[in-house]
Image (cartoon, grey):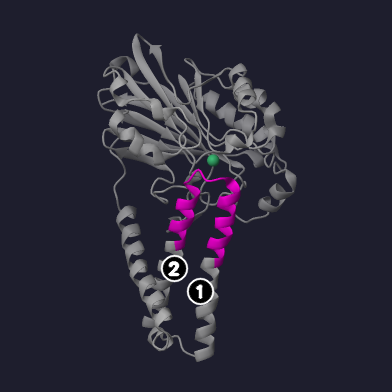
Amino acid sequence: MMNLILWAIAFIGHLGSWCVVYNRTHATNWPRKVRKRCEKLIIAAVLLPLFWFAGRVIGQQTISLWDIASNNKLEWIYLFLMLGLGVFFAARWSWRKFQSPPEAIISNRRTLVNVQHELGRNIYQTSLGMILKKIPFNQAHLIAIESMELGVNDLPSELDGLKICQLSDFHLTGQLELAYFGRVVEEANRFKPDLIFITGDLLDELDCLDWIDPVFGQLESRYGTFLIRGNHDLRIADQKLLLQRLESAGMKWIGGQRVSIDIEGTKVFLTGNELPWHTGAETLAPDSLPDSGLQILLTHTPDQIEWARPFNFDLIFAGHNHGGQIALPIVGPIVAPSKYGVLYASGTFEIDQSIMHVSRGLSGDECIRINCPPEVGCFTLRKV
Ligand SMILES: [Fe+2]
């Protein structure tokens, strides 16, 4: 029994350390080709030791870690290093798991919509989409409407009750049919938001350029729909055309910019950060932020929190990590393209004075989601 526990801890250490490498690799702005090659190397690095030690267990007819590692110094070092890391990862996971939710969340309610059942037909398209559709428990065709009341310190009274809808990571590829995203828009509009924020990764395929009007062009908000781009938007070679089409659909692009909106006589300042994939935000200086009003940051990746810290934003909206897309029972997600691993895979966090919400997004490179339904974020701000 003890040997099985030790092997399990070593396995956690082995898998956990390669997840760290995977997550950090995907947090970079390296070219996609390079990251894909790294991905293959990482998969090999995960599998080879597993096969190696499985072979040793079978060859030596023992599951005793000591017996297997005692004859080979390299095996000994590797196994005991992984045991140490296994203990570290398990302790860190437990510590995070039992953190209480942020005080800023006054209430939180989830409503699930099954778009495929509603439409009464298969909504997965393309050959890849048809394969992913067959994966048991895939939730890519659901919409989770996350309705949250957030308590914001020193929120101007005029903004008490301000309604914000965040939509992120649409990844329009054609794997899910247009009607799915139409339903997303319907839910966003049903909330009757004052502001809509789109936090990047709108379009992966040029073929979906004509979806901009029927999807983004149908969004309705009282004071405007604001967007920033993500890393996947770079797949559209003509960025000027992309932004033109988005703006003519009624959205305001604020990448690398700061804009202000007047709401009930109070200023709401919006800052857009598309780093590290698109430049612009690096020239913004914290000392130029006015003290009054409400300060909001839209950033594609939550990895920009260090950049954001000196600005003291009241609210930060991010996406990019998709909640890990696959959340294992009890364990949760294990991969996310972030230098913080899965720490900010999704959810609401308090970072210094700021409240940060990381959306699970709506889709992905591959429309596969397990225990991680696509999200429409509906936030009502409350003065506390
Ligand atoms: Fe994304």
Q: Position of residue 172 (x, y in %)?
A: 64, 36
Residue 156 located within the stretch drawn in magenta? no
Say which element carries label 1: helix
- Please give the name of the residue rendered at 27% of the width and 17% of the height, measured from the top-left corner: 292
Compared to residue 29, the image places residue 293 above or below, namely above
Compared to residue 280, the image places residue 300 above or below, namely below
Q: Residue furthest top?
A: 265
Q: Position of residue 269 (x, y in %)?
A: 37, 19
Q: Residues within 10 Å of mark 2 (few under 14, many from 20)?
A: many
Compared to residue 261, the image places residue 362 above or below, namely below
Q: Quadrant of residue 177?
A: top right
Q: Which residues are magenta?
A: 18-44
Q: Residues within 10 Å of mark 1 (few under 14, many from 20)?
A: some
Say which element carries label 2: helix
Please state, as top left, top right, bottom left or bottom right, where the C terminus lies in the image: top left
Q: Amino acid at mark 1?
A: Pro
User: Are the two marked residues, 2 and 1, in contact with CB atoms closer than 8 angstroms?
Assistant: yes
Residue 28 located within the stretch drawn in magenta? yes
- Rendered-image quarter of ligand 1: top right
Q: Is residue 360 visible?
A: yes
Real-space CA distance between mark 2 and mark 1, rounded to the nearest whole angstrom: 9 Å
- Please give the name of the residue rendered at 54% of the width and 37% of the height, measured from the top-left corner: 169
Q: Position of residue 188 (x, y in %)?
A: 53, 27
Q: Amino acid at mark 2?
A: His
Any mark on residue 68, and which? none
Q: Position of residue 2 (x, y in %)?
A: 36, 81
- Please give the name of the residue rendered at 62% of the width and 17% of the height, measured from the top-left corner: 248
